[in-house]
């Protein structure tokens, strides 16, 4: 997906880019390519794949109407800034918190924030469970893209949501993970409201956004330590 195709396709998401926004995406791409050599940020480094698999895919969260009316978003395990930074470029009114445990990646994110003048993002260098334990019931939306198994993400992110907030993980093939996560969602007082399926342009690869609503406060025992969450999932799979 080249820049022109990117501009055309996101119009279907009701996004019309200004010159300033387009400049920020182009600058972000250049920074990603330059600093990837130092920090090993991503395996996706050519122009067309960045526009398709990083920028366009992140912006598909605008398929969920509540993105436009939310004021706070949590992006856990953001890596090089996805989906959080593309969202922040498009809607500067949303306060977006990027949580990343890798210090070098956080250094890159701070550079991007400064270079693109993204005053609406906050970068937190922390393990997800440590951050969420002290920031419960705080966010309208929590999201992650290609970070971990759905059951793990749910336990890490749902406690950070306000009651009635939305957990919106970006996934590819989800059927097996969803089956293994249904009981966990009940424990976390959350329920699946909608499954949004679509394909990425150009390569026609399958993608899914789960729209999961927090219906009541989550027990304070969650989230557990990451290793305990992972071990519990492995035990349940047996």
Image (cartoon, grey):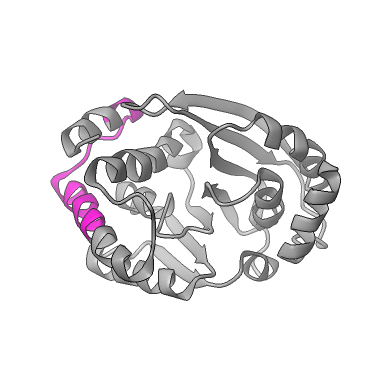
The C terminus - image quarter: top right
| Depth check, front residue: 24 or 233 | 233
Q: Is residue 145 left or right of residue 226?
A: left
Identity of the residue drawn at 47% across and 52% down: 71
Q: Is residue 121 above or below residue 7?
A: below
Identity of the residue drawn at 68% across and 62% down: 136
Q: Is residue 98 left or right of residue 21?
A: right
Q: Is residue 45 left or right of residue 18?
A: right
Location of residue 42 by image quarter: bottom left
Residue 202 on the magenta segment: no
Identity of the residue drawn at 40% across and 38% down: 57
The N terminus - image quarter: top left
Q: Position of residue 223 (x, y in %)?
A: 74, 61
Residue 22 on the magenta segment: yes
Q: Main secondary structure of the magenta part?
A: helix
Location of residue 232 by image quarter: bottom right
Q: Is residue 51 above or below residue 193?
A: below
- How many numbered tags mark residues here? 0
Identity of the residue drawn at 51% across and 66% down: 100
| Depth check, front residue: 31 or 44 | 44
Q: Is residue 217 left or right of residue 102?
A: right
Q: Position of residue 196 (x, y in %)?
A: 54, 27
Q: Position of residue 48 (x, y in %)?
A: 24, 40
| Depth check, front residue: 230 or 82 | 230
| Depth check, front residue: 19 or 106 | 106
What stretch of residues is rendered in magenta? 11-30
């Amino acid at each position: 997906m080249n820049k022109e195709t990117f501009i055309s396709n996101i119009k279907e998401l009701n996004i019309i880019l200004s010159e300033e926004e387009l400049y920020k995406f182009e600058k972000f791409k250049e920074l990603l390519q330059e600093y990837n050599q130092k920090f090993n940020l991503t395996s996706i480094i050519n122009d067309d794949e960045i526009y398709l698999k990083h920028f366009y895919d992140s912006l598909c969260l605008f398929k969920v109407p509540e993105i436009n009316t939310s004021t706070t978003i949590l992006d856990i395990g953001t890596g090089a800034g996805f989906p959080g930074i593309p969202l922040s470029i498009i809607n500067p009114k949303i306060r977006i918190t990027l949580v990343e445990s890798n210090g070098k990646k956080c250094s890159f994110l701070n550079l991007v924030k400064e270079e693109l003048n993204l005053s609406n993002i906050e970068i937190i260098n922390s393990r997800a469970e440590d951050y969420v334990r002290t920031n419960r019931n705080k966010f309208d939306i929590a999201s992650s893209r290609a970070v971990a198994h759905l059951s793990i993400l749910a336990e890490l992110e749902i406690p950070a949501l306000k009651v009635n907030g939305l957990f919106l993980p970006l996934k590819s093939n989800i059927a097996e993970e969803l089956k293994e996560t249904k009981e966990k969602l009940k424990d976390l007082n959350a329920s699946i409201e909608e499954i949004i399926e679509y394909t990425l342009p150009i390569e026609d690869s399958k993608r899914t956004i789960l729209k999961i609503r927090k219906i009541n406060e989550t027990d304070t025992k969650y989230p557990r330590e990451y290793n305990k969450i992972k071990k519990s999932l492995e035990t349940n799979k047996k």
